[in-house]
Amino acid sequence: MIIFGRNVRLEQRMTTPSYLLAVVPLASVLFALLVGAVFLAATGHPPIRTYLDLLDNGYTSFYGITDTLGLATPLVCTGLAAAFAFRMNLYSIGQEGQLYLGMIGGTWAGIVLADSLPGFIAVPAVLIVGAIAGALWVLVPALLRARLGTSEIVSTLLLNYVALNLVNYFIFGSTGFFRDPTTSFPQGRSVSENARLSPLSFFTEKVTNTYPTFFIAVALAIFLFWFMRASNYGYETSVYADSPNTARYAGMSSTWLQTSVLLVSGALAGVGGATYVVGPAGKVDPGLLQIGLGYAGIVVAALARYNFLAVVLAAVLFAGLRTGGNALQASSDPVPIAIAVVLQGAVLLFALGGELFRRNRIVISRVERAVAS
Amino acid sequence: MFVANLPAVAFALEARQVTKRFPGVVANDKVDFQLARGEVHTLLGENGAGKSTLASVLCGLYRPEEGKVLRNGRDIRLNSPRDGLANGVAMVHQHFRLVDRFTVAENVVLGHKSLPFVLATREIEERVGKITQEYGLPLDPRAVVGELSAGERQRVEIVKALYQGAEILLLDEPTALLAPPEVEKLFVTVRAMTRAGKSVVFVSHKLGEVVDISDRITVMRGGRVTGSVSRGEADVKRLAELMVGREINIVPRRAKSPTGEVLLSVSQVHFERDGAEVLADINFEVRAGEIVGIAGVAGNGQRDLAEVVAGLRTPRHGNVTVCGTPTAQSGATVARRAGLAYVPEDRLGTGLAPSLSIVDNLVLTRERGFLVDRKSAHDEAEYFIKQLEIKTPGPLTPTRKLSGGNSQKVLLARELFAVSGSRVLVVCSPTRGLDVGAVEAVHALLDEARDSGKAILLISEDLDEVMTLADRVMVLYRGKITLEQPGANANLEHVGRAMAGIAS
């Protein structure tokens, strides 16, 4: 490519210098902020002040960070779900639907089982049933993929719409089990109080939007990080991901690996849905559908380059942009939420674009014309 | 302008003091290379000697940091292979760059700069047909490339280069994927090209075959030119020494007749693929301390035979017994537990997981518990690296970063000396693509394993290798074993005929 009379081209790096691992993501965020600044300036908002507000409302103020951690809780789960599948080259994008099913399954457990159980069993029961529901939702795509090679991208995506309409049907379309029978207003039926956790106060008198489930999600991330490195299962998936032929040569079963990875991925997203049940919602809440936390999980996983620990950081970063953006919208000089979405998109775009510079270096040379003989 | 610097005889293509660096290595270090018009010039050297790099510089794929490339005595600056083509220089890469779904003619014009919106298919096919006849490249312009053999695909690449007006053709390891008859055909083409005044650069590490075809051989080692000899001066031993940098021993090993117990027995094995019988009534035994070599041209059922013996494929009927345990119907894990080890032909894509470390690759065929014991594998890796002189930064280096010879050492080490203690080894084309030094090392390892009492089934397309190593030679032709001879007095001519399917 010729730019300003210079021949510019990319050459693959043989090794990546370690400083780039930190510089590239930071530079990506910086560039994303610059792009956002253009939009802010164009809509008449002072960029720097807006960013400082965003920082305060999303991360540094007490309510800002606690709101962010609360929102990050299911996002960590869907991020882990996406990373878990993507590492195996299984591009399941069904986290959105599995999240809803986790919420439905968790609510069912919270209503039916929890009354007779003490809290320390009821809460795990809700999370586990949510996980099972999420896993079951991906069972058919998983079997189709493992047995027939059907693209999991399409099948999991289509099931997201089924799940979405299922939730809508339970709350708006019917007066069934999940609908609150005590009011004519269409809303979900609450689970037993045994199955709920109280929000954390972080040693203050304040009531926050962060629930202990955040730490469960972080614990899951740490466990997966360790387990996939140390265990035989993690080893087999890494061999399979790297070279399916090698896995077959070593006698590993691709059917088992593909199916189980997709099921675990579904279960992780399902846990994310269930955290809403034991946490803020306590019922099947269609309000959740408007946020798109399942799809955001894919973005988070990509930002984290499928590293389970990095998923936590990426989820908090991403959630902060959202809560900060929400707060800006409600301020005296309202900044449209679309700006926050633009920022999220820009962060992803630059982070993925930054990969190019991590793997390649730019070579600039003079343009010389080839002499035809 | 007054042309003072032009040499008396301008070379068709010349590299002067070319230096090309990659991170950590100097791939070409002040390399000089001259190619005369109408000449076949071989660049000979081990893997990693820098010959492919030089060829890539000559065709415009790489830009050298220092030095220059001259065409007919004029300094040319090549920024891309397209510039190379503009100067009449084209390269045929080892891995073909063709579109499987396109026809031969479509592939030939692919990437051509001035194509009309609608292709004049008939006209292109006629031109392609003309080129194929002129240079002895039997090829149907309308055939779909995906259905062609490796040799035919290579011809498509050559036709493509000629179609685009190449005067100088660089062939990178052109014989690596070819069966012996196809190599002959390639040589016919090469001769036709030089008769037409074109020049050919052959990049190769196979000593034996380049001596006949080359007018001149330039030997490279470690990024430098170590010598250049013209036809007549070329002597295999001298060339080998220039390549390796020391004297090497290419005397064939002598076979003894083994008397050990039968460790591997294959009887009446039939195997079908897509309804066609690809292995028919295979019977043989391999004894402790014996290497049984199976020769044959690629595609005669070698791979299926290896996979059936390794338990990766289930034969329609017949028995495979490893150290007394029947394994034909029970899968790879059972065969492995019974004492079988398997080195597949495709090292990096099947035998090893390329992105995983040496340590993780050593774990691959071990019995693993719930958690993987990498500690002992790490010690094992360090031991192998030292004992087998595996060149690597360390045990945690991904195997794809190793050279072919070093990754093969890792694979052989795992399969030969695994903690489980294998007694039977199935090994397929273990030295394909390796340089002379590595071939020697691999052969020494196999010999050592044989002398320590292992039973080895060597399946190889490299006839020299089979003749060198095997105590007993068999030929696989169209899924049947058509010849069996003791290695000590195997008749090369008989074996060659059997490989070609001619009854002797």
Image (cartoon, rainbow, N blue to C red):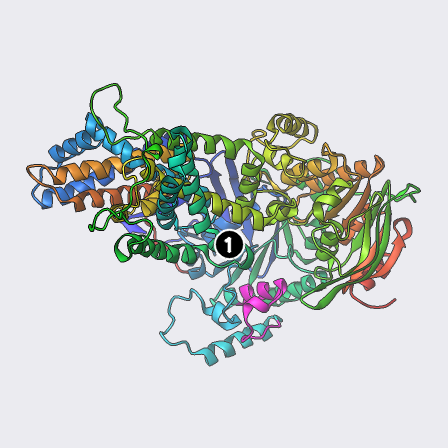
Q: Is residue B136 magenta?
A: no
Of residues B145 and B8, the one nearer the viewer is B145
Residue B67 appears in view: no
Depth check: give the residue in front, B262 or B11: B262
Instruction: Please give the chain letter of the residue carrying mark 1.
Output: B
The answer to which image quadrant residue A56 occupies is: top left
Residue B81, compared with residue B227, is above or below; it is below
**Residue at image x 57%, y 46%?**
B51
- In this view, the residue farthest toward the top is A203
**Residue B390: percent from the left, percent from the top?**
64, 32
Q: What x and y, as percent, mark residue B300? A: 73, 62
Q: How many marks?
A: 1
Where does residue B85 sit, x and y in percent of width and height? 45, 60
Crowd around label 1: few <14 · some 14–19 · many ≥20 (10 Å): many
Residue B23 drawn above or below residue A242: above
Does residue B151 lie above or below B386 as drawn? below
Residue B142 is one of the magenta-drawn residues = yes
Q: Quadrant of residue B48?
A: top right
Q: Nearer the viewer, residue B363 or B185?
A: B363
Q: Is residue B87 left or right of residue B492?
A: left
The answer to whether residue A18 shows anywhere in this view is: yes
User: Under tag 1, what secondary structure?
Assistant: strand
In the image: residue A9, left or right of residue B422: left
Q: Amino acid at mark 1?
A: Leu
Q: Does residue B227 sit above or below B489 in this rendering?
A: above
Q: Which residue is mark 1?
A: B13
Residue that appears at 42% across and 57% down: A155
Which quarter of the picture shows residue B248? Answer: top right
Extent of the magenta region: B138-159
Q: Position of residue A370 (x, y in %)?
A: 38, 55
